Image (spheres, helix red, strand yellow):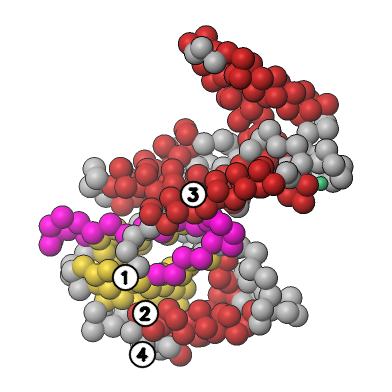
Amino acid sequence: MEEAVRATLQAQLLDRRQKLGSAMEESGEAAQLAHLLTEVDAALERLDSGSYGICRVCHDSIEERLLLADPLVQACLDHLTQPERRALERDLELAHAIQLKLLPRRSLGFGGWEVCYHFAPAGAVSGDYCDVVTPESAEGAMLVALGDVSGKGVAASMLMAHLNALVRTLAERREPLPKLVGQVNRAFCESTLPAHYATLVCGMAGPDGGLDLCNAGHVRPILLRGSNASPLPPGGLPVGLFCSAEFAVQSLSLGPGDSLVLYTDGLTEARDPAGDEYGADRLASVLGSLHALEPQALLSACLADHAAFRAGTPVSDDLTLLVLRRAA
Ligand SMILES: [Zn+2]
């Protein structure tokens, strides 16, 4: 078990222990709570003695995502009881539904811009983050944000929801973009565990075709002008690593028909059956050859090429792809 995961689980257990303690003081259901407290203490003891995370039936390691969803679980996925398994499935279905509600509309437009995207979790929930916020007035700029939270599964999806809330709340202050990303960084630093961070690209798309972009450690967006697809210069540090980090802005001007393509590394790091990576070069050349398509068709054609490349290899990472097009 990685040190970071162990730290997360220990923090969760200690937190539960404290909450149970205060609930017992206030509640009449002391017997049931006392039982839970015993279970939490037993888990903390197993964590100390090194026997934590071992299945009580087969003595293999319990899946990390299972432990992150329920730190008290004592059996691997194969050896959960039927009610345990059903409860876990229900939790994941609910988390999936909650996450989908956080996403913007599949296709939207504002001030001569069109945006569409594809969001595909590798499992029930995703650690990818994607949002579009249109301004209240026609002179305002539309916020487009895409990111990738460290880790996978339920824990990553919780951080994704947290990042979503931070960006939405702080964006309402209408500060310049580097300041917004700086504030998101600080808040994310202060409210997450040290091992947790997120890569993030934020763009402010104005009605005149101006596009300010801040890249916090995310894979390089691709600018598509005619058949010319070129990655933008690399950005700075991810958010959540250093509270005092500063973020630079890149100012672009998109003409009619130009697009900016944002994606997460689940797209470019996917492998074919021979083990080769899809890669940013192939993505750029595919985008260049498809540039004449409408955004939604471009998205679909790009994903079709990706699926053809993978040729059925299992999906191992969350994938998000977004096209922001200046209307022709
Ligand atoms: Zn087992």
Q: Is residue 174 left or right of residue 249?
A: left
User: Residue 150's spot in the image, x, y percent?
Assistant: 57, 50
233 relative to 274, above or below: above
Q: Which residue is mark 4?
A: 292
Amino acid type at circle 1 is: Ser
Binning the other alpha carbons within 10 Å of mark 4 as few (below 14), some (14 to 19) or many (20 upward) gives: some
Q: Which residues are magenta?
A: 117-141
Task: Identify the residue position indicated by label 2 in the image.
Answer: 296
Indicate the secondary structure of the residue bearing disc 3.
Answer: helix
Q: Residue 185: give x, y in percent of width and height.
A: 43, 42
Q: Residues within 10 Å of mark 2 (few under 14, many from 20)?
A: some
Left-right relation of 115 to 74: left
The kind of residue tagged 3 is: Leu
Q: Is residue 22 visible?
A: no
Q: Main secondary structure of the magenta part?
A: loop
Residue at the far top: name it: 25
Res 34 label: none
Spot occupied by residue 180 in the image (x, y as percentages of width and height):
33, 46
Q: CA distance from mark 1 to mark 4?
A: 18 Å
User: Picture quarter containing residue 132?
Assistant: bottom left
Query: For mark 3, what is the residue?
Result: 94
Of circles 1 and 4, the one toward us is 1
Secondary structure of the residue carrying numbered label 2: helix
Count of numbered circles in the view: 4
Please report contact status of discs 1 and 2: CB closer than 8 Å, yes or no.
Answer: yes
| Mark 1 burial class by Cα count in 10 Å: few <14, some 14-19, many 20+ | some
Label 1 – label 3 distance at C-alpha? 24 Å
The secondary structure type at the circle numbered 1 is strand
Tag shown at residue 107: 1
Asked if residue 81 shows in the view, the reply is yes
The answer to whether 176 appears left or right of 182 in the picture is left
